[in-house]
Each structure stands twice: as structure tokens, then as C-alpha cells.
Image: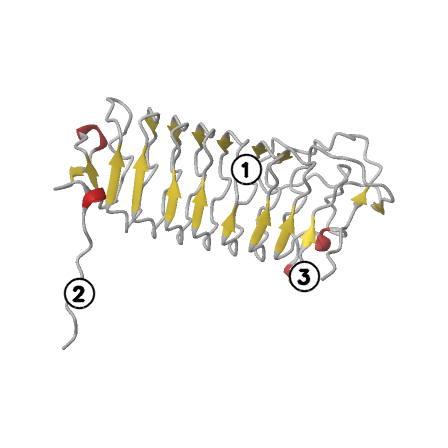
Amino acid sequence: MTINTYIVSSNRRDDHGHGDDHDHGDEHDHDHASPVVSSTRAPVTRMPASVFSKVPVSKHSTGTPFNAPANKALSTAPTVSPFLCQAVVVIPDTVTFIPDNAFRDCSILTSVVIPSSVTSIGNGAFAYCSSLVSVNIPNGVTSIGYNTFSGCTSLLSVNIPNGVTLIDTFAFFGCSSLKSVNIPGSVTRIGYNAFDGCASLTSISIPSSVTDVDQYAFARCSKLTIVIIEKCVSNTFYTTSFFLTPACVYPACADSGLKTCSSDPRSRTPTLAPALL
């Protein structure tokens, strides 16, 4: 199967592709110059902000997997956007940074391949990608930013690599299908509402490296019944860190505000149903 690579460029003055990287809202940096198809494939280390977002549904294509353009002067104008929001996106291995809101609201995106060259994923980069089922986070990434996967209601599991130190505010907010997530021993802080509303999450293990679990970090996780805390340190948790979450904690950690599990849940043997006669 042939995979088309679309390269779109414009004569914008900012040839570093900075765009509006600090804007976390819905407004985008639109180029006023007419976009042209580039005949070169210049190596790129940075994608401009919001380049894959806000694509009209009527112009989406769900067929052939899409290789993201390898040209940094990529226009965000709606006239070229229909080539960008696809069901499957492959980011080229020259990219090191996925900027703020890059794929935001790309509702047909089901899978994205992020190369190992990527070391930074911007705020809201995959927010409200409601069909996204899986995503790989490369080993070089050191933080999961603000709102990065918020509203990804189809996301089932996430493997956070060792080296990530921060899971920021609203990082996985409202990921209602998320059943499993690992928190590596490199993480030191879990931000406000980071996993708020992850209604399918059943257990979580918090490593001893974590010294700050902010308010509502695991709020409204209605199926979360087991929390393993490797090291209970005073002032790590807020009384609302597990707001409206029915979990018990092991070992005992009064600072968490949770009741203590009656036994170590990791050593429990599953009960087998009796054989049918």
C-alpha cells in the first residue's frame, strides 16, 4: 500500500515554525500567504503549533495512513488542513518537538506513531482526540504537559517511559476508557486533576519518587479500588487528591486520606468460580 507524504509550505517569515506555541486556547496562527507545495524535504526538528487541529469533519480522510510533512514551514490555514487530520498519523523521525495543540480536536485520529527523536510533547497536543486508542510516548520525553491527552475518551492504556518527571495538570483528564497506566520511578509530581474522571482505571501504583500529588489528581475515578503507595511521605497528598474515589491504599498511608486495604492486594490469589455440574 502506498503511503502518501504531503509537504506543504508557505512564505511565512518565521522559518523556525514557532507559530503561537504559548496559546492554549482555540485560536490558531493562520498564515496570510498562499500555501504552496514544496519540492524539497528539508530536515525539521520542530512542528508549528496547532498544525493538525480544527480540521472540518467533512474534509477528513480515513483511508491511507498519513506521513506527517517533513517541512517545518507548514501552514495552518484551513485550506490545507484536510490533508493533516487522519485516522493514522506517522510523524517523521526528524521531529524533536510536538507543539501545543498540535492534534487538538482531531476526532478521527485513532493511532499516532511518535518517533524516538521526540523529546517534548506540548500542552494540549492530543486533547479531545476522542477516537485515539493508543499512543506511544518515546523514552526521551521528560514531562506529560498540561492538558496533553485531556478528553481522549477512547484511550485504553498508556505506557509512560522512565525519565518522565512530571505528569502535569489535566494531563489525562476525562480519559474515561483508560484502564491501565504505569507511573515510573522517575516521576516526582502528579498535577492537579491529572487523572480526574478516569472512570475505568481500577488500580494505580505511586512510586516512592513522587513527592507531590496535587488536588483532584485522581478525583472521580469511580472504579479505582486499589492504590499502592511505595512510600508514604507527609504532605505528599491533599485531602482531595482522591476526591470521590472509592479506593483503599496499601500499605497504610493516612496522609492520602484513603482507608487502608485489609491485605496486600498484590498478593491476592484470584478466586476461581466453581465448576458447573
Q: Which of the image's four quarters has the N terminus?
A: bottom right
Q: Say which residue label 1 marks.
A: 138
Measure the C-alpha gap from mark 2 to mark 1: 41 Å
Under mark 3, the amino acid is Ser
Q: Say which residue label 3 marks.
A: 61
Badge 1 crowding class, 10 Å Cα cut-off, few under 14, some 14 to 19, many 20 or more, is many
**Disc 3 versus disc 1: nearer the observer:** 1
Question: Residue lying furthest left in this view?
Answer: 262
* Mark with earlier residue (2, 3): 3
53, 274: nearer the viewer: 274
How many numbered marks appear?
3
Badge 3 crowding class, 10 Å Cα cut-off, few under 14, some 14 to 19, many 20 or more, is some
**Quarter residue 182 falls in:** top left
Res. 273 mark: 2
Q: Position of residue 190 (x, y in %)?
A: 38, 31
Q: Position of residue 109 (x, y in %)?
A: 58, 54
Q: Is residue 156 above or below residue 192?
A: below
Q: Answer whether labels 2 and 3 touch (C-beta < 8 Å).
A: no
* Mark with earlier residue (2, 1): 1
Q: Left or right of 203: which side holds 136?
A: right
Under mark 2, the amino acid is Ala
**Disc 2 versus disc 1: nearer the observer:** 2
Measure the C-alpha gap from mark 3 to mark 1: 27 Å
